Amino acid sequence: MVEDKRAVELDDVPCVVVDQVAMRYRVASTEIPRAATPDVRFLRKLKRSSNLVTVYALNELSLVVERGESVGIIGRNGSGKSTLMKIVSGQAKPSTGAVYASSTPVMLGVNAALVPELSGDQNIVLGCLAMGLSRAEIDQKFGQILELSGLERSIHLPMRSYSSGMSSRLRFAIAASLDPEILLIDEALNTGDAQFSDRSRQRMDELRSQAGCVFLVSHSLSTITEMCTRVLWLDKGDLIMDGVARDAVGAYRDFTKHLSKGNNISATKIKDEARALLVATEVQDRRNSRGKAGV
Amino acid sequence: MSAKKSTLPDPAAVQPLSVDMRQLTRVGARPGFLDYLVELWDYRHFVFFDARARVLNGTRRDRLGSAWLVLNPVFNGLTYYLIFGLLLHTSKGIKDFIGYLVIGIFLFQFSSGSITSGARAIHNGKRVIQAFNFPRATLVIGANIRELLTGVPMLLAMLIIVAVLPPEEKISWMWILIVPVVGLLFVFNLGVGLILARIVSKVHDITHLLPFAIRAWMYGSAVFYSFDRFITHPGVLAAVKINPLFVALDTARSAILYEQLPSWRSWTILAIWAFGALAVGMAFFWKAEESYGRG
């Protein structure tokens, strides 16, 4: 069914190229094979390696994202959305393949971990220094970060005394202080109270309008249709659909509707039909006129 | 089209895209060795801020605060003095045993502390590593600078003890030679720390072995006795005297206690150890730069 097409030449330099990326882990499973007798189990415990299971978090995937695109990623839990985001941002190294980008991608999330023993203001400076800002730039941005975090005088307390909402606000404020060209937003961001979520939404809109390209993971389909020009639908580590926001979100909505009614067969049918129409991407490096991108 | 889980249809087509990759860089790629060193230099503010903030916060929970930086080695010295000086009489044949012991204990503590925290720096900094992209060696360097900062008041206390406790030593210009000794020891610790940090990040079990190795190293470095009394075989004695910590102790003792200019041979041995360890450690650590903080 797969047929080759002539290569399309991209004139502009793209923002992000995902080249044949796949991710799998080996993890220990507590599931005990049925045949095991107690003493075999004991040996297994000692060896521990014998019950390793391979998890396919993301199957081979290639993408080219151009300047000005904002890409939404949708899918059920465990479909590989966050894995893909981590790989694009450089937080995780793919098992195979590589991601190329025109500048360092910045992930905007609440998981930017900081040092609990240090106070909030020290963590701001430390986090900014770790992102490569100079002292002068930090002095200039400090007020803005403090304001966005909304921590006021608690900023002088050690971070270990913060509530989880407070520390995620601080993390977000630090990560949002950069003006990145490539921006990744993981919308587990809906922590914090109403006041903060308004403020963070405003800052995110600002960043999105400045960024060259945006990746957005969200379970809110209306947010995705509203903000994204292109949507990827992932399921169990496979790319199902890659297309205009309205179409992909529509298909996905159908799919989940059938699933929640317990109509697994028709849901799978929707998924399979979408997948069968997918036009996958293969990246070719123009430097060597044919063949795949340099590794 | 079947309802079976595992049969996902192939994509309809594969669209090759020819991309100009020259202006793109691989996300998370390890820079060349020289670029890496330059990058480390660019992150110097991060290193110093991290080290200073943690030193100041390290003893904040204690009532005596920073006094523990000095009290800790003083108590340690007292313990060893009681056991080895008064009970076991290892002091025989050593001129000015208290000074000998104090210099041994303080410098050994500096070295073992630096190596241990350098070795654990990557493991302990995992959360910061996953949150930000920065050259990972900064964490090991930061850990060593932290130990150096806590080491300075400690060494001043050491000099005061040597000067005040009987038999009092005359303060001579040669005391300034403690600075290059500590400097070379710092470089050596950093190199060993870099090597161990990579190993510990892969095989965490090594941290359990580290205290034993360091204990053995202490006994092999004449911290509280003199080799000449216990080792008679000239070959073994020569081998033991190449040990960098022993050379450092010997150099410091001859300058501070015995007012003898340390020989060029000692300086050379120490410098070779220090810069050799740093060169090997830096290259070894850099090789695995992309793999830290994952899994």
Image (cartoon, coloured by chain):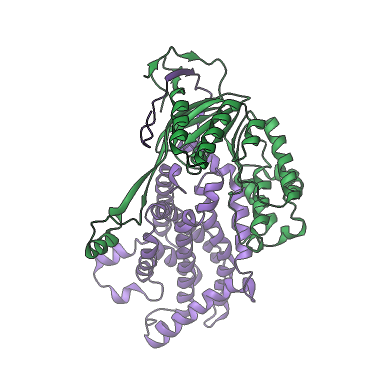
Name the spot of residue A130 as percent of width and height, x first: 60, 46
Q: Residue furthest bottom?
A: B87
| Residue A27 left/right relative to A79 | left
Residue A103 visible from this viewpoint? no
Quadrant location of residue B203?
Answer: bottom left
| Residue B71 left/right relative to A2 | right
| Residue A37 left/right relative to A176 | left
Please name whichever residue, B130 or B181, is drawn nearer the observer in this view of the structure.
B130
Image quarter in which the N terminus of chain B is found: top left
- Residue at image position (48%, 78%) is B77
Residue B6 visible from this viewpoint? yes
Name the spot of residue B109 as percent of width and height, x first: 47, 68
Q: Tell me the colour chain B is drawn in.
A: purple
Please name whichever residue, A94 or A133, is drawn nearer the observer in this view of the structure.
A94
Q: Tell me the colour chain A is drawn in.
A: green
Quadrant location of residue A36?
Answer: bottom left
Name the spot of residue A262 as percent of width and height, x first: 48, 42
- On screen, A241 above or below A158? above
Please name whichever residue, B157 or A86, is drawn nearer the observer in this view of the structure.
A86
| Residue A129 left/right relative to B116 | right
- Residue at image position (50%, 44%) is A77
- On screen, B240 above or below A60? below
- On screen, A288 above or below B90? above
- Residue at image position (52%, 63%) is B178
